[in-house]
Image (cartoon, grey):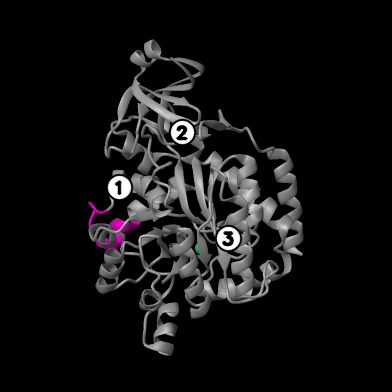
Amino acid sequence: MKVDLIIQARWIIPVEPESVTYENHALVVNDGKIVDLLPSIIASQKYQATTLEKLDEHVVMPGLINSHTHASMSLMRGIADDLPLMDWLQNHIWPLEQKWVGEAYVRDGSDLAIAEMIRGGTTCFNDMYFFPEITAQQAIHHSIRASIGLILIDFASAWAENSDAYIEKGLALHEQIRHQALITTPFSPHAPYTVSDEPLKKIRVLADELELPIHMHVHEILHEIQEQQKKTGQTPLQRLHDLGLLSPSFIAVHMTQLSDEEINLVAETGTHIVHCPESNLKLASGFCSVAKCLEAGINVAIGTDGAASNNDLDMFGEMRTAALLAKGVANDASAVPAKTALEMATINGAKALGIADKTGSLTIGKAADVIAIKMDQLEAQPLYEPISQIVYATNRQQVTDVWVAGKQLLKDRNLTTINVDDLKAKVAEWQLRLKS
Ligand SMILES: [Zn+2]
C-alpha cells in the first residue's frame, strides 16, 4: 500500500496508551493523518512511502502543546524582569502595549514565537492577545496548529474600544476562520479582575451556542483573590461559578492558592487547569497544587505563558519544572512522575483545548503532529528509560524534526516555513523601537 510518509524510529512514545515506549517501530502517515504504528520490519513490507525518514538515534513522540501563551509578547522578552505581577503589568507591560501594539507588532511577534515553538518541538499553542486575526493568519501561514483566543477585556486597546466591540470582532474572526483545519477559536476573557459580569454573561451564552471553549487567567496571585473577597465576599472562582462559567469547556490558567473546596469545585464542574510553573515562579505568583488537582481527577495541562514573563517558550523546560515543582509543593517525590508530566504537555493540553480527537497522542486516525528528538549525545547517555530522559534530561535543541498534520515544519533543525534571517532583522528593529 502506498503512503505519504513513514517515520522509522529507535523509540516511539505514543503517550496513549500511557507509559508505553515502542522500540524499532514505524509511524505511518497518509493525507496528514496517522494510519499505522507497527514494527519497522513489518512496515517496510506492508507500505511503500513517498518519503521514508530513518531516525535510528531518535525518540519520536507527539508534538508538545503549549496550552497558554501570548505569542507576540515574545518581542518583550527580557524587557522588564524581577518584578511582581501588578508592578510588572501596570508600570511596564501595559504602557509598552499602549504605545506599540498593532498589526505589525503582532505579526512579527507571532512569527518569532511560532519559530521558537516549532524549533522547541511545540506543534500547537493556545494564544490570548490583541489582534488575534494576525496571529491566526501567521499560524495558518506557517502551518502550525493553534487555538486563537477571542480576547475580551474591559478597557480599550488599539484593537477594540469596549467589551461589545471585542465580542463583535471576536465573533467576526470566528466566522472567518472556523473552517481552517488547524485553528480553533476559544473565547478568551483576560481575567476576573479585568472583565466585568455583563460581558462574561454574554460570552457564556455565545460559547454554549457556538460550542467554543472559554480560556481565562484565574487566581494568578493572592492579591487578586483578596481584592475580590474584600469587594464582594467571594473568591474570583466562586464568582465565575455563579456566572455559570465553570464547566468542561472552561480552561482556567494558573489557579494558584486553591483551597480544598475549590479543588473539589473545579473537579465537579469538569473545569480544566493550565499550569504555568515558570511564569508563576518568576512573578512569585504562588503555587498551584498540581498533585492534589490531578488526584481529584482534574485535567491539568501545561503552558509557558508569554515570553515577557518566562522568558522562553520552551515546553521541555516547562515540563521539567512542572514535575520538579509539584514534588516540592506536595512534599512528595512521587508527585507528578515523568509520564504524567509528559501527558500534561501533550494529551492533557489537547483535552483542555477540546481537540483531543485530532492531536495530543500518536493514535491511529489523529493528525500527524509529531516530533523527533536526537538522543545520541554524550549528555543523553546512558538511556535507561526514554520517558524519564525526555522529562528530566532533554534539551529543546535536541529536537531535529517536526511535523504538523503530516507537513514537515522543521527538517534537521531548519525551519521550512520561516526565513530566520529576515525574522531576526525584524526583531532587531523592534528591539530598537521598544527600547526608545
Ligand atoms: Zn497569561
The residue at which mark 2 appears reads as 368
Disc 3 marks a residue whose amino acid type is Ala
First along the sequence among labels 1 and 2: 1
Q: Residue 308 has which mark?
A: 3
Please say if 124 is above or below 275: above
The amino acid type of the residue labelled 1 equals Thr
Magenta stretch contains residue 17: no
User: Regarding mark 3 in the picture, which secondary structure is present there?
Assistant: helix
Q: Which residues are magenta?
A: 325-335
Specify whether residue 84 is in view: no
In this picture, residue 131 sits left or right of residue 82: right
Quick check: is 328 in the magenta stretch? Answer: yes
Q: Are marks 3 and 1 in contact (CB under 8 Å)?
A: no
Between residues 236 and 244, which one lies in front from this camera angle?
Answer: 244
Crowd band around label 2 with a 10 angstrom C-alpha radius: few (<14), some (14–19), many (20+): many
Whole-number angstrom distance, CA of label 1 to CA of label 2:
22 Å
- Residue marked by disc 1: 340
User: First in sequence: mark 2 or mark 3?
Assistant: 3
* Callout in the foreground (2, 3): 2
Q: Quadrant of the N terminus?
A: top left
Residue 60 at x, y percent in the picture: 41, 31
The amino acid type found where label 2 is placed reads Ala
Can residue 182 be seen? yes
Q: Is residue 417 left or right of residue 58?
A: right
* Residue displayed at 27% across by 38% down: 19
**Circles 1, 2 touching at the beta carbon (< 8 Å):** no
